[in-house]
Amino acid sequence: MNELIPCQRNSSALLLIFFTIFTFPFLKVASAACHADDEAGLLGFKSGITSDPSGMLGSWKKGTDCCTWAGVGCLLNNRVTSLSLLGQPDKPNSFLSGTVSPSLSKVQFLDGLYLQQLRNISGQFPELLFGLPNLKYVYIENNKLSGKIPENIGAKLAHLGALSIEGNRFTGSIPSSISAMTQLTQLKLGGNLLTGSIPIGIGNLKNLTLLSLERNRLSGAIPHFLGSLSELRVLELSHNNFSGSIPSSISSLAPKLAYLELGQNALTGKIPDFLGKFKALDTLDLSHNKLFGTVPRSFGNLTKIFNLDLSYNQLVDPFPQMNVKGIESLDLSYNGFHLNQIPKWVTSSPIIYSLKLAKCGIRMKFEDWKPSETYFYDYIDLSDNEISGSPIGLLNKTDYLVGFQASGNKLKFNLEGLRIVKTLKYLDLSKNLVFGKVPKAVTGLQQLNVSYNHLCGAIPATKFPATAFVGNDCLCGAPLPPCKA
């Protein structure tokens, strides 16, 4: 009597399956929980973190599925394959403090480790990485790791595809064993305290597309063997102590190199003509060296260049005619140029945001300069020229200007007519013919210098020192002497 007929029996079975899936989802979670070794390794890593003010690791709780934890990625049957923790520079509470626990070596399927901008991760190079056979990508950037880079790093991490430990405090030389890391496409060691020369073994890393050694204390000549890295798109050697001339072998990088940064060194000689053959060049920085002579006419071939910095050298006229469709940033300051005018190829650029032509022999009336686009400008430095007139017509059209420097010119205008936008942080109009009163809006600036002009009246309450206001006709009030009744 109570026996179910076949259709009823099938319906009951379907209902049972439905309720099992949708009413008891925790059964799926339990079966999908990450491997015990991965959980133990990650919790061991967490135990090495002494401060986590933003609760970045708050979801890392024992007994829960670690594949759902913040920064953790899983593939390969729910094995952890990546750990990515990123601090935010504008949010100090997003930084972590502590060390990289050796327990992380338990996460054997880890192929990517990204600990970036955490600021306060300290200790030595984490040799636990040597025990992770699947590791391909290591980015431990902008932290406080210190000590020497292990001498055997090349032998232990020969399988890496990318290594970045930039922005730490590593000392000593670059290990020669790095020559064994032939699978590397990116090597970033910048922003440390490394010394010595570039080891010859780096010439073996034929797959490199990016080599960054900037902001160290490296010395010697720029080696010829870098020219053999034919896949390079980015070469960053700035802010070191490299000397000698730019080697001719670098010319072999012309087909693909987009970023060549050699600024802030002690390079000498002339700018080589072959740089004009770098048709893919986006950024060229040769600033703050001891380069002399003229800029090669071949620079007219750099039609794709967006960022050019030749400032603080000993370069002389004539500056070549450039054939760029638009330049984003240009700095020719403090050489021996006599440009007379701001070049037309600069004035016509629709995308320029930074223009620095300090002491470039510019002799013009400011009102005669009419750039085709002012919207993107955020930095303008025309200091130490012979520019007259008023910049108000131009500056009052810029909504996002951050810095304007025009010290040592013959500018003549009423300062009260200048619209000081919210973004403006740096204003230097010293040693001009500016008149009027100091507007209250300057209180929002970070740096101000209006000394040696013809300003008058009471100074609004500011944080700036007396040197920002001295040498005017009749300014008074703190930080200068009090105004007379």
Image (cartoon, rainbow, N blue to C red):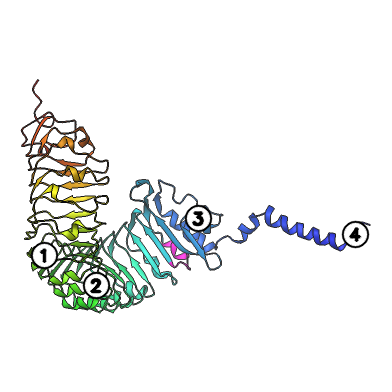
Q: Amino acid at mark 1?
A: Phe
Residue displayed at 12% across by 72% down: 245
Name the disc covering residue 280, or none: none
Looking at the image, tell me whether mark 4 or mark 3 is earlier in sequence order. 4
Q: Nearer the viewer, residue 433 or 274?
A: 433
* Tag 1–tag 2 contact (CB < 8 Å): no
* Structural distance between the alpha carbons of marks 4 and 3: 49 Å
Q: Residue furthest right?
A: 1
- Quote the CA–CA distance across marks 4 and 1: 100 Å
Counting from the top left corner in percent of width and height, residue 73 is at: 49, 61
Q: Earlier in the sequence, mark 1 or mark 2?
A: 2
Q: Nearer the viewer, mark 3 or mark 1?
A: 1
- On the image, numbered disc 2 is attached to which residue? 279
Cα distance in 3D space between marks 1 and 2:
19 Å
On residue 69, the disc is 3
Sequence-first tag of 2 and 3: 3
Residue 3 numbered mark, or none: 4
Which quarter shows the N terminus?
Answer: bottom right
**As drawn, 88 above or below 485:** below
Disc marking residue 319: 1
Q: From which residue to which does the magenta span run?
A: 102-111
Is 383 or 22 nearer to us in this picture? 383
186 displayed left or right of 427: right
Q: Secondary structure at mark 3?
A: loop
The amino acid type, in three-letter code, at marker 2 is Lys
Question: Where in the figure is residue 216, as x and y percent of width and height?
Answer: 21, 63
Q: Of the residues under marks 4 and 2, which one precedes in the sequence?
A: 4
Q: Secondary structure at mark 4?
A: loop
